[in-house]
Amino acid sequence: MPTTAVKKTRAAATRRGAEPKGATKGHKKAPQKLKMLITVVPRRKTDYFMDLLQSFEVNMQFCSAAVGTANSDILAMMGLEDSEKRVIFSLIREDMAPLALATLEEKFHTIKDAKGIAMTVPLTGVIGVSIYQFLANHRKGGKQNEI
């Protein structure tokens, strides 16, 4: 289709009240995607890392008990007596994930007995607008502590 025909089609659609393809007038910005941030940390440091992750606008987290895979002989040889771990599952916005991962990596290197791993998994969908708004920390008016 020649360019003049495309321009005429768009102009006709605009006269009829329809917005041309690619127009942004009246359209809302696409929502931020969410990711599942999975963090494995020593049991004793769970509360610290859960509080740290909340600073990245994480509204929903849960943790589960886990055990390291090394046997007791190897742990004793390395001077590690505790293999109890916690896995923290956090839902985080895609734009906040890189900063959260960088901060976690820095904390794993600088805090004594706080070795861990972290990774993200993209989420493809969330059912319900209000659930998405809560998880992505997008609130329309009201108090910040309301659910």
Image (spheres, helix red, strand yellow):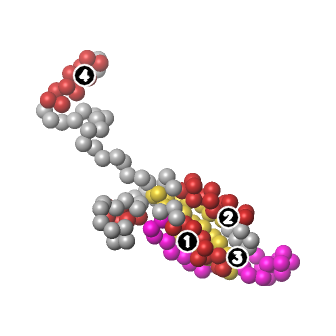
- Which percent across, then down, holds residue 143? 33, 68
Compared to 114, does 20 lie above or below? Answer: above
Q: Is residue 68 left or right of residue 91?
A: right
Residue flagged by tag 4: what amino acid is it? Lys
Element on which disc 3 rests: loop
Badge 3 amino acid: Gly
**Mark 1 highlights which residue?**
51
Q: Which mark is on residue 68?
A: 3
Q: CA distance from mark 1 to mark 2?
A: 13 Å
In the current view of this chain or complex, which residue is farthest to the front? 143
Q: Nearer the viewer, residue 96 or 119?
A: 96
Tag 4: Cα neighbours inside 10 Å, few (<14), some, or many (≥20)? few
Residue toward you, 90 or 121: 90
In the image, is residue 85 part of the stretch drawn in magenta? no
Look at 43% across and 56% down and name the residue there. Answer: 124
Which residue is denoted by mark 2 in the rendering?
A: 107
Kindly report the distance in space between the C-alpha atoms of the residues bearing marks 3 and 2.
Answer: 20 Å
Q: Reading the chain from its start, which is encountered first: label 3 or label 2?
A: 3
Q: Is residue 90 left or right of residue 134?
A: right
Q: Earlier in the sequence, mark 1 or mark 4?
A: 4
Magenta stretch: give its range: 58-83
Q: Residue at horizontal 73%, vertical 63%?
A: 109
Say what secondary structure mark 1 lies in.
helix
Q: Residues within 10 Å of mark 2 (few under 14, many from 20)?
A: some
The type of residue carrying mark 2 is Lys
Q: Nearer the viewer, residue 50 or 94?
A: 50
Residue 101 percent across, percent down from the top left:
60, 58
